[in-house]
């Protein structure tokens, strides 16, 4: 698999980091707690972690694919775990964030500016 296959995966996990930060912001606003923006160090560490995780998943998939080239069961297992990590887990996390925001009432009004925030975020 070319590295380009994992580029959308990288973007999904960066979006997961942003969704988590939005969840923290909405929780703190709901609880009327002052919330400073994330520091430059925190953002840098989060982005670095996403990059490293993406590269690690790519290399694991690549090397397992090279070893199990002639074994269809091995290729299916490699495809399955790769699909879970790159697509299913980020979608489940977005679902968790969306359900948490909806059930806890962090965005009760869907009119005006809040409606635009929902369109942009989800």
Image: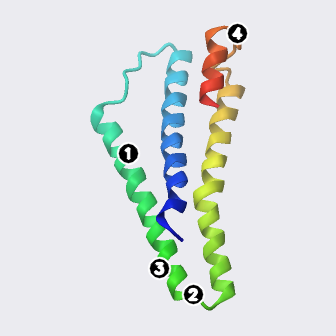
Mark pair 4, 3: CA separation: 50 Å
Mark pair 1, 3: CA separation: 24 Å
Task: State whether residue 11 is above or below residue 60.
Answer: above
User: Which mark identifies residue 111?
Assistant: 4
| Residue 11: image location, x then y, percent | 51, 47
Question: Dot 3 lies on which element?
Answer: helix
**Tag 4 near tag 3, CB within 8 Å:** no
For label 4, count other residues whose C-alpha is less than 10 Å away and answer few (under 14), some (14-19) or many (20+): few
Q: Which residue is mark 1?
A: 47
Task: Say which residue appears at 66% left-offset and 55% top-offset.
Answer: 88
Mark pair 2, 4: CA separation: 54 Å
| Residue 91: image location, x then y, percent | 65, 47
Question: Dot 2 lies on which element?
Answer: loop
Q: Which residue is mark 3?
A: 63
Q: Which residue is mark 2?
A: 68
Front position in the image: 38 or 69:
69
């Amino acid at each position: 698999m070319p590295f380009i296959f994992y580029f959308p995966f990288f973007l999904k996990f960066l979006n997961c980091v942003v969704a988590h930060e939005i969840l923290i912001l909405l929780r703190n606003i709901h609880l009327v707690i002052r919330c400073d923006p994330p520091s430059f160090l925190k953002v840098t560490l989060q982005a670095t972690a996403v990059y490293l995780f993406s590269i690690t998943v790519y290399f694991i998939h690549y090397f397992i694919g090279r070893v199990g080239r002639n074994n269809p069961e091995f290729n299916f297992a490699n495809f399955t775990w790769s699909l879970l990590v790159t697509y299913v887990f980020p979608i489940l996390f977005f679902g968790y964030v969306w359900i948490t925001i909806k059930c806890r009432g962090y965005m009760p009004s869907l009119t005006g500016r809040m409606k635009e925030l929902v369109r942009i975020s989800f």
